[in-house]
Amino acid sequence: MAKKNKKPTTGEPPAAETSQTQTGQTTPPTSTSSKNVKPSSSLPSFSSSALVICRNKHWRYISSFHGPWLQLPVEVLETLANANYYMPLPRPVDPAVFYDLVKIRQLVDGATDLAVRAANGVASSSLSNSLAGGAAHHMQALGLGFGNAGGAKLSPERRFRMREQATQKLSRAYHLDEIASSVATMQSTSTLENVAGLVLQRSSHDPDASYVHFFHEKIPSRQLAECTDLRVLDMIIGQRPSDCEPLRTRAIVRMFKDDFEGAAQDLTTALSVCRLNRPHNPPTDESMQLERRTGRRRENPPLEEKDQPSSTEVQLLFQRAGCYLTLACDHVELALARDPRGQTDEQSYSTDGVSGIDGNGPVAGDGLSQGTPSQPDEQGPTRRQLESRKTVRLYAKRALRDYVEYLKHFHYSPNLPIEVSDDFSRQVNQATHRSKRYYGQSRSTAPDPNSPAGSSVGHTIFPLAMMFSATPPADLPPYPSTDLVPAVPASSSVNAAETTTEAVTYHPLLTDALHSLLLCHALVQTSTKELQRHAYMVARLARLADGYPVFQASRSPARADWIEVLRRAENWIELGSSWEALCAPAPLPVPPSANSVSAATTGVNTLSITGPASPTETDEQRKERLRHQTIIEALEDERVNDEASFKAAILARQKRAEADQATGSASTSPNLNSTPKRWAVDDGREYPILTERAEAVARWIREAPAVSGIGTSKRKKKAGTKKASSVEKIDSTGNQLESVNP
């Protein structure tokens, strides 16, 4: 294999930084290494014009984790995470991700301080004392310090220890969430890119340094599969078998190498390790949190790190579901192909298939119809085609199972009191503008007796997975309604005196998971009527997704694929409108109180990111900023796999950015009747690149034969004894009133 040909390489390419030499690490990171004589033959992309970037910049879903959490002060971010945790369900943002962001910011900032001090030979934490700005601080951040600033010169041993501590902090950050940590390190100093390589020069088998250097190693752009060796991850996994995070990283790299079966195996092992190491004492019970809020305590105590929820299991479920979905799509070509050889390959293929990647074995109830396909062949389907069709459905069911497990971690409410959502906006506004006074204030305000919202009896909470069950909740607001995109002015909204609103817990990958769920149902061949119900439910939830106050809007690859599938399958589920119209963002809840209106609107506009970076930004600076942003987004998009798609992605994103800028400038004119828009919503305009996944699903819908028994297995489960999911009734103050079994 090509990666083995790079085994003896030890040097860094000329385009990479010379300080990242791998003296003691000849085996692990060979992706950017090459011999002095053979770079052109083994890695032809190492030319003078090649774009060489860190490996972690290739990670998928990076755009989903962009947002103001990268710029907010850590103290404010921690305050917001605490406020989010003590909100009634459904919380605005998943608390596990929110607390991860806080810890990642603390770790990356601490590592930056140590790395810059070691590079400049500064013993005291002068960098942290100059966070207010200034030319000296910016020069230090770039690694261009002005010497020791009068202090004693640091010894090489002291500098090594500081770099070692910085590497340990970065390793812990990547263990928490490698996507969010990659985004954070991209926004930090370039000194961080070298710190792990310098540690490896002296301690070549340090697992923390090896793990961090794996992410920071420079490789040619869009060549991660060819320029990445898994041996460094194998070494780390062998050194720390109780850590599931290196298994997660190895699985992601296997996906880039198109080894999805191996990736699924790694993720299954990682899930087992994660659940085995799960603490036996779970975090504080939800009812206890609600009781705290009911007590109107002036201070919600900060949650200790050992009690904070973990997002590792959610990450593993999402990644494994994506593996299974890709494997299902990969078998569509073989399942629908016309094999002129007839029965010649039946004997050899009958031993292949998917005999349990994660030990599940074949799924029962996959009865295959013996009828002819939509374009019947005279001989009928071969055994190879029948086995491939069973494989498609098997992998799609496994992906569906993991996506449902993923959704169980989040909640939805059809009737959350508006004063609750307004309370969170008020807390965000106080924390960002008056952070010092915020700690001494009461964070819960008594309901206004004159407000119609004060008479709210309670609100209902559903796990998101229940929204896609065979018997969904019956007491939901009708959707889609006659007005898909409400154009009601703010004055009319206040007069209508709405007291409740729909709400859903936000997660950066939620939109992609919801649309992937629909792709799975299409491959499983769920009935048209049921799939239409699921599609409307996805649209209902997607229009509510709002990452305020930490995440900005991002594009979803699964959403783009679903839109393309609807187009190519000619809307076979008979949706009443276009998908863009169905997913148009729901209007923000407007509080009945006039004082609350200004507070909520101010909270939404407090951290707005849609405008230019600076009010004095010139036209040229704006174009350069947009160009840089489009290149970064295109590089991390999984739909970009060659030069043509890369150029198409950049061109389409530039046009979209210009359209957004034009729309933004037009909307800056004062309009008192305009309702506030949701803060982080995908506008649905995807650039026209047809992916193999969308093509495979659309072809499966058009050509795959119908399967007998689809849909009956779910009703059989309904008839039997089924463990009821609890639906909590919460009053407006947070008291738990009753538990209802739907």
Image (tube, rainbow, N blue to C red):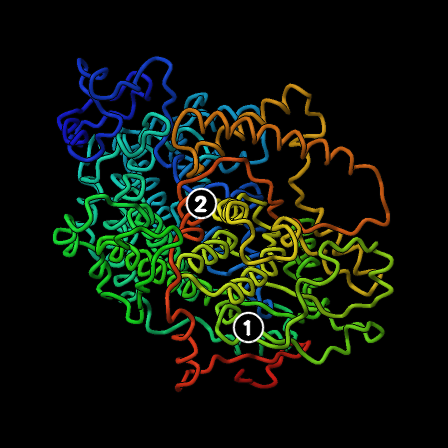
Pick whichever of labels 2 and 1 is earlier in the sequence: 1
Q: CA distance from mark 2 to mark 1?
A: 31 Å
**Which amino acid type corresponds to the residue marked 1 in the rendered image?**
Phe
Q: Nearer the viewer, mark 2 or mark 1?
A: 2
Q: Is residue 484 left or right of residue 208?
A: right
Circle 1 sits on which residue? 462
Q: Residues within 10 Å of mark 1 (few under 14, many from 20)?
A: many
- The number of numbered badges drawn on the structure is 2
Q: Find out whether the residues at labels 2 and 1 contact each other: C-beta distance under 8 Å.
A: no
Q: Nearer the viewer, residue 635 or 479?
A: 479
Q: Judge whether residue 121 can be spotted in this image.
A: no
Q: Is residue 604 left or right of residue 627?
A: right
* x then y, percent, for residue 419: 72, 67
**Which amino acid type corresponds to the residue marked 2 in the rendered image?**
Ala
Q: Residues within 10 Å of mark 2 (few under 14, many from 20)?
A: many
Image-quadrant location for residue 58: top left
* x then y, percent, for residue 169: 36, 45
* x then y, percent, for residue 52: 36, 23
Circle 2 sits on which residue? 694
Q: Quadrant of the C terminus?
A: bottom right
The residue most toward the front is 378
Q: Secondary structure at mark 2?
A: helix
Q: On screen, 376 above or below 360?
A: above
Image-quadrant location for residue 271: bottom left
Image-quadrant location for residue 131: top right
Q: On screen, 461 above or below 552?
A: below
* x then y, percent, for residue 167: 32, 40
Q: Nearer the viewer, residue 206 or 625?
A: 625
Q: Secondary structure at mark 1?
A: strand
